[in-house]
Amino acid sequence: MDLSALMKKYAEQIGGQYTEYDSLQSIIIVPVSGGRFQTVVGNIVKNDLYNRQLISLRSKVCPAKKEMDYKMLLEQTVFFNYCRFIIKDNYIQIEAVAPLSSISEETVKEMLQEVANLADQFELKLTGADIY
C-alpha cells in the first residue's frame, strides 16, 4: 500500500490539505466538526519486536502535564475503534497503528478520521482551545 498516495486521495475527497515530507511520512489536515481542522501525521514505521512494517497515524492533543487526569484518558480508550493515547515528545497524542501488509484503504481512511476527530475532541476538552 502506498500510504502517501492514499492520504493525498483522502484529503482531496474530504476537502483537506495534504503535504508529503518523504516517501515514509505525510501530513493531512482533516476537516472536523465546528469548522475546525486537525493535523494528522502518517508514516510507516518498522516494529522490531515483530519484524514488520506498521502504518502509524497520529495527532497532537496538547502538552503533557503532571496534573492531567491520565486515568480518565486511559479509561476513554475503551470507546475508541482504532486509537490509543500516547505521550511522544512531551505531548499527549492520539495514535492508530496497523500492519501495513494486511490493511485495506477503507480502514486507513476510517483510522485517519478517528484520529482527527478524537484529537480535536480531547484537545477542546483538555485545553478549551483549537491548537493543532
Image (cartoon, rainbow, N blue to C red):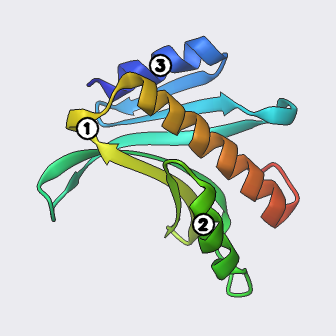
| Dot placed on the residue nearer the N-terminal end, 1 or 3 | 3
The answer to whether the residues at label 1 and label 2 have Cβ atoms under 8 Å apart is no
Q: Earlier in the sequence, mark 3 or mark 2?
A: 3
Which residue is rendered at x = 44% and y = 24% of the image? 106
Mark drawn on residue 44: none
Residue furthest toward the bottom?
Answer: 66
* Residue name at image x 49 percent, y 48 percent: 82
- The x and y percentages for residue 95 are 49, 53
Q: Residue at x 64, y 17 (%)?
A: 14
| Amino acid bearing label 1 | Leu
Instruction: Identify the disc placed on residue 92.
Output: 2
The reply to whether discs 3 and 2 touch (Cβ–Cβ < 8 Å) is: no
The answer to which image quadrant residue 30 occupies is: top right
As measured in the structure, the alpha-carbon distance from the residue carrying label 3 to the one carrying label 2 is: 26 Å
Q: Amino acid at mark 3?
A: Lys
Q: Secondary structure at mark 1?
A: helix
Left or right side of 15 for 49: left
The N terminus lies in quadrant = top left
Check the image and report above or below for 66 versus 29. below
- Indicate which disc residue 100 carries: 1
Query: Mark 3: which secondary structure?
Result: helix
In which quarter of the view is residue 64 placed? Answer: bottom right
The number of callouts visible is: 3
Label 1, label 2: how far apart the Cα atoms are: 24 Å
Camera-near label (1 vs 2) is 1
Residue denoted by label 3: 8
